[in-house]
Image: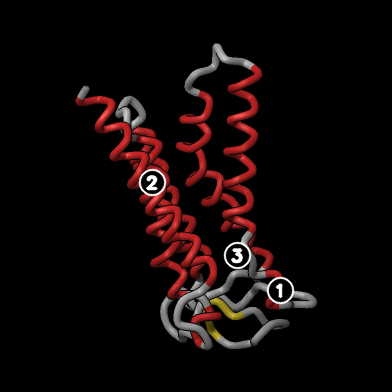
Amino acid sequence: MLLNALVIRDFSFSKIGLSSYGGAIGLLIGSVIFEKMCPSNKTFIKGAIISLPLIYSISKLACFFAGCCFGLPYDGLFSVTYTSGLNIPLIPVQLIETITFMIIFIICVSLQKNKMVAGITIALSALAKFLLDFLRYNHLEEKISLNQIISIVFVIIGICLIIKRRKEYEH
């Protein structure tokens, strides 16, 4: 099945940016401020972190329809051609991300009672983002992207949160 119906106007590589991590950081800062203002909401930050994969999943649908953040050249099943962009068949990486992050969200919601779920969510999401970034068009010219470097930092942060919560839980 070849999907060739999407059109991009005024495509620019500058549209491929760090919006996902910027959005995540903004959500976390807002959550911390809210929890400081309303200390009775002790689980607000955890809920915000668990919801990050869902938010990202939905945002990737918008990227798919806008034609940004697209994948590597690929002329096979489910390839997508943006006729006002590169005009070549591409991997629909945005849809792959949507499905992947929806699965991560479902897993993390099922783990919501686990004390380490915030760290697990951050580590899993960042690892998925790191790996899926290899399917993006910009990897034709670069080995590791800035998004992947930031993803590594977030994987480490997630692992540190898991270790911290595990030590708290053991004592």
- Exactly how many numbered labels are in the figure? 3
- The amino acid on which the numbered mark 2 sits, given as a three-letter code, is Gly
Judging from the image, what secondary structure is the residue with disc 3 in? Answer: helix
Query: What residue does disc 2 label?
Result: 158
Q: In front: 133, or 157? A: 157
Q: Are marks 3 and 2 in contact (CB under 8 Å)?
A: no
Question: On the rendered structure, is 6 left or right of 79?
Answer: right
Which circle, 1 or 2, is nearer the viewer? 2
- The residue tagged 3 is 64
The residue tagged 1 is 14
Mark closer to the chain start, 1 or 2: 1
Secondary structure of the residue carrying numbered label 2: helix
Q: Nearer the viewer, residue 21 or 4?
A: 21
Disc 3 vs disc 2: which is toward the camera? 2
Kind of residue indicated by mark 3: Phe
Residue shown at 59%/30% (left/top)? 32
